[in-house]
Amino acid sequence: MVSVSLGANKYGKAENRIVRIYRDTPRHEIVDLNVTSQLRGAALVDSYLTGDNALVVATDTQKNTAFAFAKQHGVTSPEEYLLALADHFVSGFEWIEGGLWQAEQYEWERIIVDGRPHDHSFVRRGQATRLAAVQVVDGATHVTGGVKDLTVLKSTGSEFAGFPRDRYTTLVETDDRIMATSVTGRWRFLPEAVDAGIDYNTLYADVSAVLLSTFATVHSLALQQTLFAMGKAVIEARPEIAEVRFAMPNKHHFLCDFTPFGLENPGEVFYAADRPYGLIEGTITRDGAASAPDAWRDLPAFV
Amino acid sequence: MVSVSLGANKYGKAENRIVRIYRDTPRHEIVDLNVTSQLRGAALVDSYLTGDNALVVATDTQKNTAFAFAKQHGVTSPEEYLLALADHFVSGFEWIEGGLWQAEQYEWERIIVDGRPHDHSFVRRGQATRLAAVQVVDGATHVTGGVKDLTVLKSTGSEFAGFPRDRYTTLVETDDRIMATSVTGRWRFLPEAVDAGIDYNTLYADVSAVLLSTFATVHSLALQQTLFAMGKAVIEARPEIAEVRFAMPNKHHFLCDFTPFGLENPGEVFYAADRPYGLIEGTITRDGAASAPDAWRDLPAFV
Amino acid sequence: MVSVSLGANKYGKAENRIVRIYRDTPRHEIVDLNVTSQLRGAALVDSYLTGDNALVVATDTQKNTAFAFAKQHGVTSPEEYLLALADHFVSGFEWIEGGLWQAEQYEWERIIVDGRPHDHSFVRRGQATRLAAVQVVDGATHVTGGVKDLTVLKSTGSEFAGFPRDRYTTLVETDDRIMATSVTGRWRFLPEAVDAGIDYNTLYADVSAVLLSTFATVHSLALQQTLFAMGKAVIEARPEIAEVRFAMPNKHHFLCDFTPFGLENPGEVFYAADRPYGLIEGTITRDGAASAPDAWRDLPAFV
Amino acid sequence: MVSVSLGANKYGKAENRIVRIYRDTPRHEIVDLNVTSQLRGAALVDSYLTGDNALVVATDTQKNTAFAFAKQHGVTSPEEYLLALADHFVSGFEWIEGGLWQAEQYEWERIIVDGRPHDHSFVRRGQATRLAAVQVVDGATHVTGGVKDLTVLKSTGSEFAGFPRDRYTTLVETDDRIMATSVTGRWRFLPEAVDAGIDYNTLYADVSAVLLSTFATVHSLALQQTLFAMGKAVIEARPEIAEVRFAMPNKHHFLCDFTPFGLENPGEVFYAADRPYGLIEGTITRDGAASAPDAWRDLPAFV
């Protein structure tokens, strides 16, 4: 006789596309979010076992709340907005023990008209997408920020050599290659920094700048080394950050072989390949900071 | 003075698109895979800290090995192929302690010509993508199978009512709605079953059929209930399976309101919405089976 | 002094995701469409020049009509449904001279339970997407059917040789390669066949079968030759069809070179490349059928 | 007896991802292209009819040539690069009568380090993709530039009212809405301007700026009106441009109804919808410029 049980679970409403306009003055502000809310609680087991929905805060209700909170609480930063949402569900429903709230933020720039930024017209920036997540587990609240699709390339200053060779190794060593990646990273905030209050928007700008400048200036012997240096620089730059996780595809650019055509190609023409790609992932932690595996529960690994 | 350390990490080559043709007889067979190989080992830390690649089995070497093994070992099933690959890296390089090997498999059907399946011409089936993963951690090998993008819909036999109402609740109760989802699931095999040998391809077909028939026949009071019933049925159907994890979006189909046009709409015309969507996730475990969190390390949560 | 004029234009509502359930008996039927409606008329010029919307049948109204017609007229076939929609707009608003109405149809199969197809539970087939379009220009109505993403592969029976060589030619001739493509095709119906009435659903099934079997059985010397043979077979199979247009990517599968590893690879292991890909496009016309360039206006070229 | 003929056709290699680095000084430059080359010629008919490839300049050869030309001719602008490629094929093979050459260009910005742009490290801009195409038909050469995915939004300054109402009209008139679109546009250059030589890069920057500022400053009564104004402004700004074609989705932002929650929503919180969307398309032509339908052959309509 087979018997089974319900293990880890959560449920909610994913990808609520919420646009918040601040229009209190003629100079409007725009915040553009993609918000996911999911709840957990042992008491919810009956919805799985028997379809008893008496404790199921409907996913539609979660959606309504997410939109309403953009009005009631505003969106100073995605992190603070998610914290308000998390507190609402965990405080407001005694059987909701925790959950995961996530946001993507799309950035907009003001359109320039006659050399001046326009009051209410915007163009989507497109350079990267900002990430934020709040997780509540066992009474503890964890906050992470992040970025994805930050695509960078350096046309020199990257080597790859000294690796072991076996029967299947054909790669030639190189002391000058293109290195390109699309950075996805998340940084976890120290709980005490969250409690003290963080200027999340300034921090995001700082971290983005540090990621870019570190990528640019590190002479790279391996993408692993660049990844670690980027994480180290982020932690050094901002005392609020406990750890950083990265996933970095090595977006290969292959030098074209023009010898059949009688041409030279001294690092000038490359074929940008789609698949396969290297995939380097790693965590950089601040020494002395307590680890917090719950903060990362169900977040995409190394994303 | 800030000091940092390297935490969890892995690296490798992602999305190797490997097509294996069996052509020993005029009746060819095709296996179409997307393979990702990633390695872990404490000794690799120097590649991150200093760019010392002396122990870095190049991602290019991992790629070459993945292609070569499709020849040397064949691809009886994605699970067995990944097991061979994992064993090669862990056994062949003493400093490689483990890793994660993943595959997607795209299914092809024979084209029908004059009522008979053709020997060497195929059409891509497209109904779903098969998943497999092998994880080696601390000397233990974990195997999971899975499926994604199995899109199903029932046009009746689904209710949703009895949920709590608060200030933000506007959802109307219903005793007849469309229920649609795109099933993503992974099932972990019992280690003793892996050791004894599993007919992974027959198992995949069995599990797929059970997923479909259970979705069809359960009168649903909530997607949570359907999810649990599907997992339970899978575990009941195959003794090799220790647990199942699902992520199921509730792909909303909203009944159109035709009253402004003076028309009735008794469950006939629906608007299929993209975003937001409900997202229900859960694990169903076989009672008595040992848990194995390492098996799921870095696999997309509930995927 | 620069002066400008409005040229060709149209406007409407794109990608209405309409799901129609037939539930008159316990055995339900499902039709799943993505519908785009766009209108043209010289009188609409003022909406462009001055923002005068007095004649602008709102895109929201077009959407409402498309959903309502799924109830009022049903969806016997996408072609007939679009014809009803086209007639409504062109007949109902004297200043609407014509337009373009398009549909994609996603196919569903019944789920099998205990060996029998279920009454109201379905799984999305995923093998290809059906296309239909109706165009009204200058009082003439044109109807086209089609298919996209029909992905096929043959593991032998394909050669490519005899092509000219110049300074930039490095391709080696082959008498045995994998040939794979993802067929996108549209077929235009003869106006007299449209007037007489066509069983569009049976025709679609017939054409799909002919496309597949012709791909399978033609020994291919070039993808161009296969494309032409497929179009010829379609026109021969169904007298209602005046012409066929195809776009066929040559989805390259490169034989892996295993000589560095001391392995042979007699047509067994291939790398499936993403980009670049060959792209072969062509039209096959029934001799004697009048051409109808208006039928193809603004349809994606060779799609 | 059914007889068929070959109609319009072309063939080539699509989506060659070519990255060109200029490294003659320490301050590198990067040009990142996605190039498609396709050829036409009546003599190619035999490849379709019989698989005779004697005149088929292989798609692989077209690819090699595209990469080699990035070295031999450089990529001053995508338009000039495509002109060189077109001339090579049409001049170099007497049976090649014409073709279509297309490019997408992805823009990169220098990474800022210590307040200064870095010499060889770049971040992908992501704001929009530049388009270019060269078409040769009947001995005439046509050049078009363009842009896609330029996503803009204005949070006020947009109305929609005065449209006709019928049975299916439910849309409420509004004098203040969000207007958002993702601009795709192509502009055709006057042949005499092409002959005289155009600074294509400066022109692209100028046109982009005019598109943005016109979108920002036009008080919009309809997206049609905004579209026309944007095209008019482009033609007024640059005498080299004969006509402009646009496709502009109306990316709907729906004001959330918070009355069930007892909240006001004075234009502050919106739901950004995916599908369906309005789709407005139109051409703006310079009065007196000769039309050139061949220039647009097989280019995606209104793209």
Image (cartoon, coloured by chain):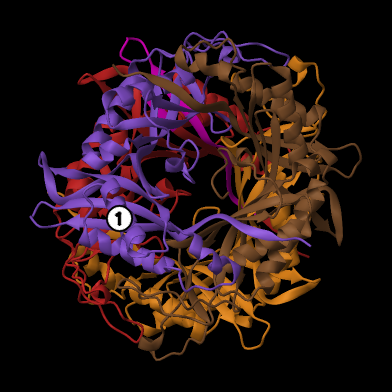
Chain colours: A purple, B brown, C orange, D red
Q: Is residue A165 left or right of residue D245?
A: right
Task: Give the residue pinned by disc 1.
Answer: D181
**Is residue A183 a member of the stretch shown in magenta?**
no
Q: Where does the magenta region start and end?
A: D6-33
The one of D79 and B56 positioned closer to us in this rendering: B56
**Is residue D32 a member of the stretch shown in magenta?**
yes
Q: Residue furthest bottom?
A: B262
Q: Is residue A302 left or right of residue D203?
A: right
- Is the residue D194 above or below the residue C230 in the image? above
Residue D223 occupies which quadrant of the picture? bottom left
Q: Which chain's residue wears label 1?
A: D
Give SS at disc 1.
strand
- Where does residue B202 sit, x and y in percent of width and height? 81, 52
**Dot 1 surroundings within 10 Å: few (below 14), some, or many (20 or more)?**
many
Going 31% across and 60% down the picture, which residue do you hit?
Answer: A88
- Where does residue A32 sit, x and y in percent of width and height? 28, 52
Let me know if residue C282 appears in the view.
yes
Tally of numbered tags: 1
Let me know if residue C210 appears in the view.
no
Q: Residue furthest left?
A: A25
Mark 1 residue type: Thr
Q: Is residue C279 left or right of residue B258?
A: right
Going 41% across and 82% down the picture, which residue do you hit?
Answer: B257
The one of D229 and C166 positioned closer to us in this rendering: D229
- Is the residue A183 above or below the residue D30 in the image? below
- Is the residue D100 above or below the residue B64 in the image? below
Image quadrant where one finds the N terminus of chain D? bottom right
